[in-house]
Amino acid sequence: MLSKSNYLEGLNCKKSLWFSKFNKKLRQNNEQKLYRFEIGNKVGSLAREYFGKGFQPKSKYYEIETAFKETFDHINNGGGLIYEGMGLNKDENVFALADILVKQNDRWELIEVKSSTGVKSYHIDDLSFQYYVFKSLGLNITKLSVLHLNKNYTKGDKIDISKLFLKSDISDEVLKKGNLTSLHIRELIQILSLKKEPEIEVGSHCKDCQYREHCWRDYPKYNIYNIFNGKKAEEIHKRNKSVDIKKLSPREYPKGNKLTDINAFLSGNIFIDKKEIKKFINTLVYPYNFLDFETFGPAIPILKNSKPYENLPFQFSLHIQENENDVIKHFEYINKKIKDFRLEFAEKLLKNIKNTGSVIVYNQSFEKNVISSLAKLFPEIKKDLLNINNRMVDLLKPFRSRNLYSPGQNGSASIKNVLPVFTNKTYENLDIKDGMEVSINYEIFFNNELTSKEKDIFFQDALKYCKLDTYAMIDLLKVLKNKI
């Protein structure tokens, strides 16, 4: 039997679909996917408030036949609004759970609820499969829609459900799929009947796959997919029958930064542009303020005057060096209470940061946007906040521009790739190793889902992580200065 999730997985990669049925143990756990699943459940619950009271089968999601009978008993008895209605066609070997079914006279609208702020391409495939299943059961579906979050909605004192969501009609896009959907379904059902895993070549479709580590185990970590975009890489892969960069002919080499990456990889040499490094360093002014934020962006706005997925800053790390030979001082803040912390965050930052000198960050667009949002929210301290933005210098720039580049970076200028290459420091020894992990766990805390002990551990780990971000910048600036 083919489900909607099977269908979407199989469209991306037939081998992944086969593994999910016959060899799940190869799957790598992905905290971000689990997080998105939980967010989807919360958004789905709110969506029911948007439409009001309706019918929902009492059976569990895995009790497919029972849920199907309950759903169609309700339909055959003239019922209208249905949540999580089950469609099952044993002859076709398919089943689908519809988020919302709405009856209008003798016609039905099938609505898929998504936690995104707009329609994605895969939403069309999602609804195409559901349409196929319910149409095969005789349901007269004439409208297919996606109910998604409104990115322009700003929360007031309470959530306004009527404004939080937008409904987008994608009927035309779904109907254009036509016979392709039934063709794909037959192909994927055939895949599930195989006794041996299908031979599918690796490619750009592997990017977020849970089986990527297994399928790429015999391929070089740094390869043509790090150099070229997906379609271009696949063309070269097919032509050369290899993902190995060493197999590229000179006429296939890209221009710009990626050419620097290839030359460094092939030669094993570090690339240094002393002139550009010196020019960058000359823009810096003491006191140095090394600054990093951590934020979280809940899909459903939690704080007043915030929007879906807006980055809310709850933590900062700040290292300050007054003059070249001075001792570096460290300041930090993390909100530990379930309250609106944004004003306190801003005031703590302004209290500790110097009002002169360079504010050194890594990837300044993020920090600048956070500061600008706070400035709009608190006009009384707007001038002081924007003064931070006006002095901001992006340490990412010399690494992104390949003024300094090591083949060990594998084409990435991320601080987590750059730091271990040029220093003896790494994030691998930390219990929290990336910003997304901090963000996810902070949202869990803010939803009051951590015990006291779990909170203490999380706060300690989050502070260590953020502190390393700013200390990493200190070390990387030293590296740059030592190169000229």
Image (cartoon, grey):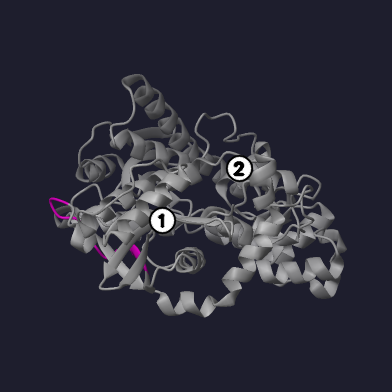
In whole angstroms, how far apart are the C-alphas of marks 2 and 1? Answer: 20 Å
Q: Is residue 20 above or below residue 252?
A: above
Image quarter of residue 14: bottom right
* Residue 20 pos. (x, y %): 64, 45
From this viewpoint, is residue 286 visible?
no
In this rendered view, identify the residue nearer to me: 476 or 108.
108
* In front: label 2 or label 1: 1
How many other residues sit within 10 Å of disc 1, few (<14), some (14-19) or many (≥20)?
few
10 Å neighbourhood of mark 2: few (<14), some, or many (≥20)? Answer: many
Give how far across and how far down residue 128 sits, in percent: 49, 68
Q: Residue at x 48, y 78 (%)?
A: 175
Q: Residue at x 40, y 23 (%)?
A: 457
Residue under label 1: 366
Q: Position of residue 292 (x, y in %)?
A: 41, 45
Q: Amino acid at mark 1?
A: Phe
- In this figure, which residue is indicated by the disc labeled 2? 419
Q: As drawn, is 369 to the left or to the right of 182?
A: left
Tell whether 59 sits left or right of 65: left
- Is 436 on the left-hand or right-hand side of 168? right
Image quadrant assignment for residue 453:
top left
Secondary element under disc 1, as helix, strand or loop, is helix
* Sequence-wise first label, 2 or 1: 1
- Kindly tell me whether residue 323 is visible in this rendering: yes
Tell whether label 1 touches label 2 (CB within 8 Å): no
> What's the magenta region?
145-158
Q: Is residue 435 left or right of residue 316?
A: right
131 or 227: nearer the viewer: 131
- The residue lying toward the viewer, choosing from 320 and 133, is 133
Residue 152 among those drawn in magenta? yes
Q: Label 2 sits on what residue type?
A: Leu
Secondary structure type for disc 2: helix
Q: Residue furthest top?
A: 453
